[in-house]
Image: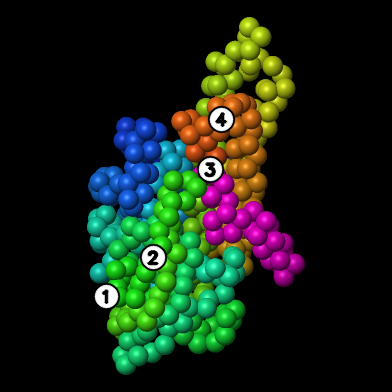
Amino acid sequence: MDFSLAEERRLLQDTVVRFIAKEYTFESRRARSRLPEGFSRETWKQIAELGLLGVAIPEGDGGLGGDAIDTMVVMEAFGRGLVLEPYLSTVVLGAGTIVEAGSTEQKAAWIPAIVGGEKILAFAHGEAASRYDTRHVETKAVKQGNGWKLDGAKAVVLDAPGADALIVSARTAGATGEARGISLFIVDAKAKGVAMRAYATQDGARGAEVKLDGVTLGPDALLGREGEALPVIERALDRANAALCAEALGIMDALNEATLEYLKTRKQFGRAIGSFQALQHRMVDMTIRAVEARSMAIVAASGANHADARERQRMVSAAKALVGQAGRFVGQQAIQLHGGIGVTDELVVSHWFKRLTIINATYGDADYHLARFSDLLLAQ
């Protein structure tokens, strides 16, 4: 199968790859991870100046009119460079949700600022007891005059410490676990009643536990229709998972290249260890897994915006399950073939492996998506 990109997408790919090679060395990435927000605002502005923040946003809303395949191109390159800047949270989840569900006023207020690198968003949906169940929302939003009052807590909100605003899911009707009655709100991250416990994640990024205690919102904070946000949330998470598959693909390719180079240069018993047939077989298996992952990442990107929800979920879950399994295999083999240095903090290999582990656990791990895929097949 021909996986080659069209001319415009090759140019996009070249732009991102050159930027990563020049500006995002491993050492500079380590320096960024030590910043309070876990990323560099200056680098975020550079990414904006390249036009990457508007790639998949419709032209009518101030973007470049691309789609999930364009996001895949960007995320694959970001995976290679282990980019810490909040592209997934702000662009894929944040801007994508506002484009889909926001009013004209909300789009005008947020999309140009996101595309210009001026605003950062975080998607606050998961809760401590929800696991990967998108319907499990305990956070409450009750009407107060013309506005709303929010109470509850959100768990592992990625990139929240550096966000200007949170997109928060809250229940405006129904019981925990019901499909209807979930709404979305745009909440100022510094609003009274919003408290965060920030921490570094295993891959060097930032997350936070967010507590909402009597947060007062105006009527313009409601994003989309009251009580009908679940389909919007599910589409947003499917787009995010497609993007994560692409990021994992970039990491796997980088791991394979680094491991092959190590096998060619590391000598034992007077010759390069890559000359040993057993290690050659391992390298072949790693390459096969990466090629399989590429085909499934394309499937996920192709189906991320599918009009049929079941078909979209089937395609994305199939990809996330296989990519999660492939990432684990490639990462473990890369560590093994590098020997003791493979787990050291000074070698980028260990950081690629950590990021693959986090990607697998984000918005549904391989086991969850394999089960969802199975359920969707049985439902047919």
Magenta-span inclusion, residue 37: no
Percent x, y of residue 127: 52, 69
- Which residue, given by chain and number where applicable, does mark 4 sit on? 342
Residue 103 visible in the displayed image: no
Give the vertical position of 77 relative to 181 (above or below): above
Mark 4 surroundings within 10 Å by alpha-carbon count, few (fewer than 14), some (14 through 19), many (20 or more): many
Mark 1 surroundings within 10 Å by alpha-carbon count, few (fewer than 14), some (14 through 19), many (20 or more): few
- 95 left or right, relative to 259: left
- 330 left or right, relative to 304: right
Q: Earlier in the sequence, mark 3 or mark 1?
A: 1
Magenta-span inclusion, residue 359: yes
- Which residue, given by chain and number where applicable, does mark 2 sit on? 196
| Residue type beneath disc 2 | Met
Percent x, y of residue 59: 31, 60
Residue at (28% x, 60% y) in the render: 119
Residue at (38% x, 61% y) in the render: 160
Part of the protein shown in magenta: 354-380
Instruction: Give yes or no for contact between labels 2 and 3 (Cβ–Cβ under 8 Å).
Output: no
Percent x, y of residue 197: 41, 62
Is 365 in front, or is 153? 153
- Which residue, given by chain and number where applicable, does mark 1 sit on? 105
- Which residue, given by chain and number where applicable, does mark 3 sit on? 354
Q: Earlier in the sequence, mark 3 or mark 4?
A: 4
Q: Earlier in the sequence, mark 1 or mark 2?
A: 1
Q: Earlier in the sequence, mark 4 or mark 2?
A: 2
Q: Earlier in the sequence, mark 2 or mark 3?
A: 2
Instruction: Give yes or no for contact between labels 3 and 1 (Cβ–Cβ under 8 Å).
Output: no
- Residue 28 has which mark? none
| Residue type beneath disc 4 | Gly
Secondary structure category for the residue under label 2: strand
Secondary structure category for the residue under label 4: helix
